[in-house]
Image: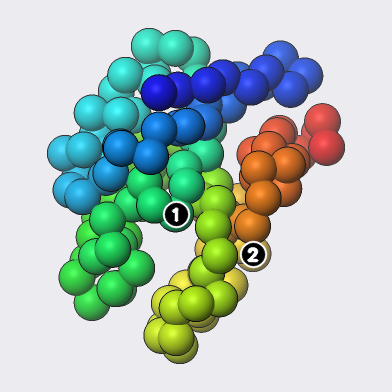
Amino acid sequence: MIKFHDPDGYKIAEETSDSLIISSVDDAVDMLGNLSFENCNAVILKESNLHTDFYRLHTGLAGDVLQKFSNYSFRLAIIGDFSKYQSKSLQDFIRECNKGNRVYFMKRLDEALLKLKPRGTR
């Protein structure tokens, strides 16, 4: 179930369902294709919306899925508690993503919305 936020005329989609799980690149492409028709190019997912393999970097799922977000020119914020993951490489990955301007790992919805707003409107 998608809820749309429209801060300052910038449409951000939030997946509110706990049942949606992106477990493959095809799942991500399907979601992005549907959201493209909504004039949306930013998405908020919950940590639980991504298969556990996403958080095991050696599986390649995170890289493949995030590449599709980039290919479709979507920005992404993932909300959750990522401190529970003990993998140093995952923690480094999260830290590097948060320094960029495409993918963010945030604790709360309000933080995600703020990060996904265009820079000139923050």
Q: Is residue 63 visible?
A: no
Q: Is residue 9 left or right of residue 59?
A: right
**Is the N terminus in the top left, top right, bottom left or bottom right quadrant?**
top left
**In the rendered image of this protein, does residue 9 appear above or below residue 88?**
above
Instruction: Please name the residue shown 71% across and 34% down the image.
Output: 118
Instruction: Look at the numbered disc 2 and give the secondary structure of its residue.
Output: helix
Instruction: Please name the residue shown 49% across and 13% down the image.
Output: 39
Crowding around mark 1 (Cα neighbors within 10 Å: few <14, some 14 to 19, many 20+) is: many
Q: Identify the residue at the far front of this view.
A: 18
The label number, if any, that marks residue 47 in the structure image = 1
Kind of residue sitting beneath label 2 = Lys
Q: Is residue 86 left or right of residue 34?
A: right
Picture quadrant where residue 6 is located: top right
Q: x and y percent of residue 98 in the render?
A: 61, 62
- Name the residue beneath numbered marker 2: 99
Marks 2 and 1 sit apart, C-alpha to C-alpha, by 19 Å
The label number, if any, that marks residue 23 in the structure image = none
